[in-house]
Image (cartoon, grey):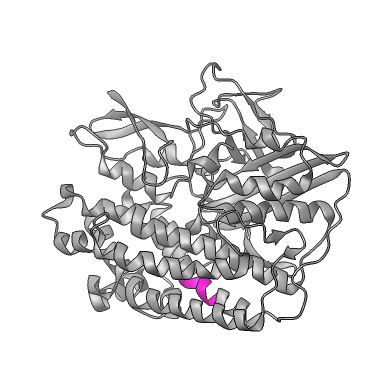
Amino acid sequence: MSRQVLGPFNRVEGDLEVTLETLDGHVSAAWVNSPLYRGFEQILQGKAPTDALTLVPRICGICSVSQSAAAAAALANLAGVRPPPNGERANNLMLAAENLADHFTHFYLFFMPDFARDAYAGMPGFDAVRARFKAVEGSAAADALPARARFLQVMGTLAGKWPHTLSLQPGGSARAILPAERVRLLSLLREFRGWLERHLFGDALEAVTALDSTDALWAWFEAAGPARGDLARFLDLSRQLSLDTLGRCPERYLSFGNYPLGRTRQVMPGVWDAAVGAVHPIDSRDIIEDLSHAWLAGSAERHHPLAGETHPDADKPNAYTWCKAPRWRDKVVQCGALARQVVDGHPLARELAAHGGGNVMSRVVGRLLEIARVVPMMEAWVRELVPGEPFCVDTVLPDSGVGIGLVEAARGALGHWLVVRNGRIQNYQIIAPTTWNFSPRDAAGTPGALEQALVGTPVGEAAGMPLAVQHVVRSFDPCMVCTVH
């Protein structure tokens, strides 16, 4: 038995370390460390509640709109207001644009280049994979980056700028869309759809969304093979490398639901529990944060977020990370695009989860499936905008109260819990997606989702960072600055 510390995982950010205990060439135990303390929850204390709209987007430059959306939702919950229909659609469009841009960037720039490594030379089709996905030099980056830049003009039109927009407000969107801008938004979405259908999928988005089983997915692949597009190239790699057996973790999938319209969400909330084959409803009271293995002190080891505490204690015994351990009904869950699709009931996602659980292949397929499903939603929301009608309503915040904002960022469930007393923030707690997925052990000693997913991963005998470990870690698309606020 041996132990090694791996890091940094620096394609997005470098602040992640993983300690692996290995036996017979495979991981037998893992400990995930988020070594960067941020302190945003403490910064917010004593501020005016609306200051959160300016401060929390600075938690992250990758998913700042998600943080804005959660803060705006918490303030709206505090005030008891709901945006008008235009405001809901504009805010949904901004969040969806950021989420899809994150998925797109993850696939082309952060995940697929690992398969162009020399370690895979000699594998059937390697030369084509390297020509397409090699970091910096491959044709995929040259194709994808301009398409991403054009797609993000959707954000510029709606929000004025990205990241750190102030357009998302409790009462809706601060920027009304003019008739000509509505036409421009539709044009940008049609352009992005065309790129996806030519390069990523090699098929209509609706045809991808209609895939309702793993048999249908593989039949779709066999019809044209890897030449169909980049999803098919990934499926070919998945089959050759058995990525559906790599990185499996607990069979509970959490989603707060996304994209509210009226009293419903276009992507449904819940927790899918594979053990019972059912979706449990989301109740914020079922969520606690465990501090037992985090470098944080508190009046107790467990808190509901509304009573949460964030007090650094770098010398705490038995602690190994700045990340808290959130739990749902004392259980470990995983979140992300796959979880959203499973909870929402998409048949392909459900079957992928049933056959192989949350694994490297299913997490990536879930992310690309979400792209195919959400772009048509965005097109519909733009068509439903009514220029000249209100995009935002005035909001008066009470001097005291609580607010909860639950949204879905690209990487999964994001929650903001806000307590206001005498017109000032008394407490502000945030649970980000990577806090769920990269959590440490809890007081019962139960490892977090990634810690469990790494067990059984082959590491080989060569020195350095094992590729299989990188595939597992990156399949979650970590965002570590969001993890420890």
Residue 430 in the image: x percent, y percent?
64, 42
Residue 26 in the image: x percent, y percent?
27, 35
- Residue 432 occupies quadrant: top right
Please name the residue shown 29% across and 29% down the image: 22
Segment colored magenta: 372-377
Please name the residue shown 30% across and 53% down the image: 243
Please name the residue shown 55% across and 80% down the image: 184
- Residue 399 occupies quadrant: top right
Q: Is residue 148 left or right of 112 when viewed as pictured?
A: right
The correct choice, above or below, for 342 with respect to 470 in the image is below
Q: Quadrant of the C terminus?
A: top right
The number of discs equals: 0
Check if residue 169 falls in the magenta segment.
Answer: no
The correct choice, above or below, for 246 with respect to 440 in the image is below
Q: Quadrant of the N terminus?
A: top left
Residue 358 in the image: x percent, y percent?
43, 52
Residue 441 in the image: x percent, y percent?
51, 30
The correct choice, above or below, for 53 with respect to 182 in the image is above
- Pick the residue in front: 169 or 127: 169
Q: Using the rendered image of the protein, determine whether residue 247 is visible from the camera's viewpoint.
A: no
Please name the residue shown 25% across and 77% down the image: 224
- Residue 381 occupies quadrant: bottom right
- Pick the residue in front: 130 or 290: 130
- Helix, strand or loop for the magenta stretch, by majority: helix
- Pick the residue in front: 435 or 341: 435
Residue furthest left in the image:
122
Q: Using the rendered image of the protein, determine whether residue 285 is visible from the camera's viewpoint.
A: yes
